[in-house]
Structure formats: C-alpha cells, structure tokens
Image (spheres, coloured by chain):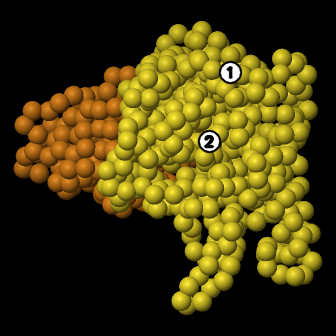
Chain colours: A orange, B yellow
C-alpha cells in the first residue's frame, strides 16, 4: 500500500497534538508498554470507577503511528465501560492484523479505521498495537506490556 | 588520528565505473519499491550479491555438490577443493600468513562466540578483566558478558566522546594486571567510526594481552591486513561482503588457535575417537565440527575474489566520496542531526530528522525507494550514549551512486514537509 495513506492528516494531527497526554492523578490502573525492537515506550494510566473509565492518560516516547494510536485510543475509551474497551481492543487488533475488515457492519472501530492500512506494513503493526496491548494489560492489572515474549498480554500474535 | 595500517585509497577515483559494477547486481535493477528506482542504502545490515557469486553458487549445486573431507569419489573431491579454495580466498583477502589460520564460521557472531568458548572459557577466570568499547555491536558485548557471568570475570568498557570516537587515554587507563582479553570493533556499525585498532592492539600487546577485532563492518569497506594489524583474532561475516548469509570467517594466530579448546564437538574436528579418549583434529578443522555450510563458504570465497578484483582501495575511495557527499548534503537540511562525526569514518551516516521518530522516517523513505535501517542497530549502548532510542542509518556500498544520495536527501525533505 501507499504508506502516505497511513500518514494521513488525522494521524499526523494526533501525533503533533496527542489527546489525553501527560500524567493522571488518582489512577486506579496503569501499565507500561514497551516495543524493544524500535524503542516505543509509553505509560498508560486509567481511573476506573463502577466499571467505567472516567479518565485516561498516556505519555512516553514513540513513533507517530504509536503516538497517534495511543491518542485516538484514549479518546475512544474515555467514558466507556471496561467491557466496551476490551471489545475495542479485540476489534483494533483484528483490524491491524488483517483478520477483521473495518467495513464489516456493526463493528465498533469507527474512526479508528484510519489505522487499517497498517496491516500492509508488517514492520509497523506492533507500533499501532502497542497502546492497545498496554490498555489490555492495565485493565488486567498487569504492570508491563511488551510486543515481544512472555509479557505480551496478547500472546505475541502481532508478530 | 591515524587509522593505520589501512592502505591509502588510490587517488584515481574517476576510473571507478560504478555503472558497470551495478550491472553485476541483478537485484538493483529487478526491484522497484513502490514503483520507484531502488536506492539500497542498508549495506551495513547486509550487502547485495553480484551475479558472479550467484553463478558460483549455482555451479557448486549443479556440478560439484557433495560432502567435504570424506568421500573418495569425484564430487567429494571437487567440493573439498572448492571449499578449501574458498579458505585460500579468505587468507588472501585478510593477508593471513597461513591457510590454517582461517576458520569458517556462520558469521561474525559465531566467530566471536568461538573465541569466547575456545579461548575465554579456557584462559579467563575469576577476577580477570575483559576490555570492550562503548561502540560495540551486541555480538561483541553479550558473549563476553556471558563469560564474565560464568567465570566471575569483569567487563570493562572504554568510553566514547561526542564524535563517537573511543577516548584513547581512557582505553589505555583500563589496563591493569587483571586484564586478560580485549575485544574491539574495527568499524562501528551504528556510527561508522573507524577505530585506530593498530594502536589499540599495540597497547594490549605491550602487556601481552590478546586482542579480537570484530571486523564485520570493516571487511566490506577497507583493505584489511591482519599481519600488519597484528591482531590475534579477526572475525567477519560473509553476507556483508557480497557473500551468502550463513558464511563468515575467523582469523586467529596459529599459536593461539592451537592452544584453544574446541568450540563444538562432532565429526571432522577429530583425528580419532574411542569411548575412552578423543584426539582432536589439527587447526582449522578442530573448530569446524560437522558438515559446514559448504555452499555459502564457496560463495564467500567468490565474493572476496570479486571484491579483490575491483580492489579494496578503490572501493574505499568511492565509498569515502559518497560519505563526504552525503554528509555535506544531509547537513544542509534544517533540523537533521548527524550522530557520529568521527574524524575517521566508514560510509555510514546515522541521523535523526528533527522530532520525527526514525521508524516513521524509514517507512516514508521506503515509499521513495530508499532502503535504510532504522532502530538501535544492535548497539543500544551507543544509542544510550547519544540519548536517542534509535537512529536512521544510511550505509553505503561501492555500488551506490551520488544520485542515490540525492534520492535520500530528497526523500528526507518530503518527510520534513509531511511532518512540518
């Protein structure tokens, strides 16, 4: 695919001005996400009450794909239930690994479909999926998520 | 700083017919990434293979294939001759005194590991110290760390300055009565720094300490003369010198190789075996257990002959001109920071484009047909030293052109515009 289709304005914008970026007071859940292959390194913090994600924030060093993915993820899950967030994790992962077509009716992907092109860039799939792995880890009270090896909460299937 | 004893490049750069040379490399014409001409600038990771080497591999598989050092039949004799002929090509390429000082390996990493097991595990003990530099590739760090862990020895690291040069006074100061081994790279893979290895070897030899040189990034680019360097071991990989993956060689001084223990046990490395006692074969066979990757080694020999026919001095001169041009052109780009500005450099340009992460740069350069490496280059300590998680690395070979440098610069401009 044309990688410029991936680096669309919406992704570049979220990279330049990431939403929900910074620390978070009173976090109930947090996890650290690492992609040792390219050095993406993020921290994700959530405040969950009554099964609802009231607040979420991330910070760290990463490429544009990872940062935009984290930014759009936080915007998508704020105010949602933990179950809804987990459903999105599964859908996003399915989309970027090519197992789920984002045009499938009724799927929850919505504007996150801008990341669908990542599936054609195998070397970048892990960049896009790292924030979602980290979210899954945080919700499962796992303190570290990586795209490699035993700590990969999704079982390393994105490789 | 002098990088002796690298032979001086010939001033006759103009005679270097890069277009004719490119004609030898089918992949440079066969592949058009995203419809663009390929600018392959990832040669420090792996170089491309000329038709002459491909033909040699085909000839072996179609006319000579058999196991070596075993059968009495014709094919086994042909295969053995081809394999041992490749050893002589390596000997000539490195200017080793004796053929038996060349051990075939699967690559530079195996060469370093062979010395760690064969020399290190036999002669290095608790409290001993091993010196490396901050420039090393992981393959010249991790084996020594493993040895230190096993033996209770200590790894000492010679620091680098802001240019990416090993601070020689600090290196000298690391030596003491506990120092037992030195392992240093000839050329840094991440930054291109050419270490003054002859000087560094002399410092070690003044105390009678053996030195291994990791030549993975030097062998493809500069004329190496192991006798002039006086190194005790020199390791390099075949796939970075236009040969096949799975090939490589380790040079070791015969006297040292003879006192070392074998690395792997098996067939071909023995003279006689009983259940009571095994007598090991002579060098180099003592270190080549089992059936080796015969075809890759024959390819390695052909690749070295190919490079020698062009002339390593001419290769070095052309690549140096490319590096100077690329450095000058990339330096004109606002916000691009070149990492590694050693006074003696091989044709490696590591850089950072403003705030743009190297992986984004790499993906977008690929879109323009420009293949570069992005990441930590298996040299995380170097990245830590310069405070970056990764860099973009353009690394040149003798078949690269000035037009490819222009393509790189133009592609970086596009990245800057997109991320503007």
Mark identifier at residue B231: 2
Q: Does B33 sit above or below residue B164?
A: below
Parent chain of label 1: B
Question: Residue B145 in the image: x percent, y percent?
Answer: 39, 51
Q: How many marks?
A: 2
Spatial separation of the CA atoms under disc 1 and disc 2: 27 Å
At horizontal 25% and vertical 50% (from top left) the residue drawn is: A144
- The subunit carrying tag 2 is B
Q: Nearer the viewer, mark 1 or mark 2?
A: 2
Q: Are marks 1 and 2 in contact (CB under 8 Å)?
A: no
Does residue B253 appear left or right of residue B384 in this picture? Answer: right
Left or right: residue B342 compared with residue B101: left
Q: Residue at x 76, y 48 (%)?
A: B97
Q: Is residue B80 shown above or below B158? A: below
Residue B230: image location, x then y, percent:
65, 39
Task: Tell me the tag on residue B323.
Answer: 1
- In primary-sequence order, the first of circles 1 and 2 is 2
Q: Badge 2: how crowded within 10 Å, few (<14), some, or many (20+)? A: many
Q: Is residue A45 above or below residue B263?
A: above
Tell me if I can see residue B239 in this picture: yes
Q: Which structural element holds mark 1?
A: helix
Quarter of the view holding residue B66: bottom right
Q: Closest to the observer: A71 or B193?
A: B193
Please rate how many residues cluster around mark 1, counting C-alpha atoms within 10 Å: few if below 14, some from 14 to 19, many from 20: many
Please tell me if label 1 and label 2 are on a single chain. yes
């Amino acid at each position: 695919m044309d990688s410029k289709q991936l680096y669309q304005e919406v992704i570049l914008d979220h990279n330049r001005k990431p939403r929900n970026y910074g620390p978070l007071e009173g976090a109930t859940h947090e996890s650290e996400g690492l992609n040792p292959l390219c050095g993406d390194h993020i921290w994700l913090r959530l405040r969950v009450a009554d099964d609802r994600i009231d607040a979420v924030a991330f910070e760290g060093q990463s490429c544009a794909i990872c940062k935009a993915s984290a930014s759009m993820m936080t915007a998508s899950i704020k105010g949602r239930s933990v179950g809804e967030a987990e459903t999105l994790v599964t859908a996003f992962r399915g989309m970027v690994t090519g197992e789920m077509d984002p045009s499938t009716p009724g799927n929850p992907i919505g504007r996150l479909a801008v990341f669908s092109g990542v599936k054609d860039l195998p070397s970048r799939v892990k960049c896009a999926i790292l924030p979602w792995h980290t979210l899954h880890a945080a919700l499962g009270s796992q303190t570290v998520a990586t795209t490699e090896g035993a700590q990969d909460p999704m079982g390393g299937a994105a490789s | 700083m002098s990088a002796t004893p690298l032979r001086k490049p010939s001033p006759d750069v103009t005679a270097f017919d890069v277009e004719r040379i490119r004609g030898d490399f089918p992949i440079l014409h066969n592949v058009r990434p995203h419809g663009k001409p390929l600018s392959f600038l990832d040669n420090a990771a792996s170089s491309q293979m000329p038709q002459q080497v491909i033909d040699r591999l085909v000839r072996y598989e179609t006319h000579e294939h058999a196991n070596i050092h075993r059968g009495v039949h014709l094919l086994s004799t042909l295969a053995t001759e081809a394999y041992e002929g490749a050893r002589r090509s390596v000997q000539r390429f490195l200017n080793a005194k004796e053929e038996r000082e060349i051990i075939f390996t699967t690559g530079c990493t195996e060469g370093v590991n062979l010395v760690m097991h064969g020399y290190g595990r036999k002669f290095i003990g608790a409290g001993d110290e091993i010196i490396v530099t901050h420039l090393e590739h992981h393959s010249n760090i991790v084996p020594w760390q493993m040895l230190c862990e096993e033996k209770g020895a200590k790894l000492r690291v010679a620091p680098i300055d802001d240019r990416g040069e090993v601070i020689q006074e600090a290196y000298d100061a690391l030596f003491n009565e506990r120092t037992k081994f030195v392992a240093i790279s000839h050329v840094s893979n991440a930054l291109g720094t050419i270490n003054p290895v002859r000087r560094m070897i002399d410092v070690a030899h003044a105390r009678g300490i053996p030195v291994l040189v990791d030549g993975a990034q030097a062998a493809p680019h500069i004329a190496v003369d192991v006798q002039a360097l006086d190194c005790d071991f020199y390791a390099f990989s075949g796939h970075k010198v236009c040969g096949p993956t799975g090939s490589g060689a380790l040079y070791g001084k015969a006297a040292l190789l003879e006192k070392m223990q074998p690395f792997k046990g098996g067939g071909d490395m023995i003279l006689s075996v009983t259940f009571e006692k095994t007598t090991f074969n002579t060098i180099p066979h003592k270190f080549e257990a089992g059936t080796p990757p015969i075809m890759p080694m024959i390819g390695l020999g052909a690749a070295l002959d190919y490079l020698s026919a062009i002339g390593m001095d001419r290769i070095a001169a052309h690549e140096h001109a490319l590096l100077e041009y690329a450095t000058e052109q990339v330096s004109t780009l606002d916000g691009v920071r070149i990492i590694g500005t050693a006074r003696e450099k091989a044709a490696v340009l590591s850089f950072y484009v403003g705030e743009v992460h190297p992986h984004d740069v790499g993906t977008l350069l690929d879109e323009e047909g420009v293949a570069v490496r992005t990441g930590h280059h298996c040299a995380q300590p170097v990245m830590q030293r310069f405070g970056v998680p990764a860099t973009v690395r353009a690394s040149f070979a003798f078949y690269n052109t000035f037009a490819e440098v222009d393509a790189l610069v133009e592609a970086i401009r596009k990245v800057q515009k997109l991320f503007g």
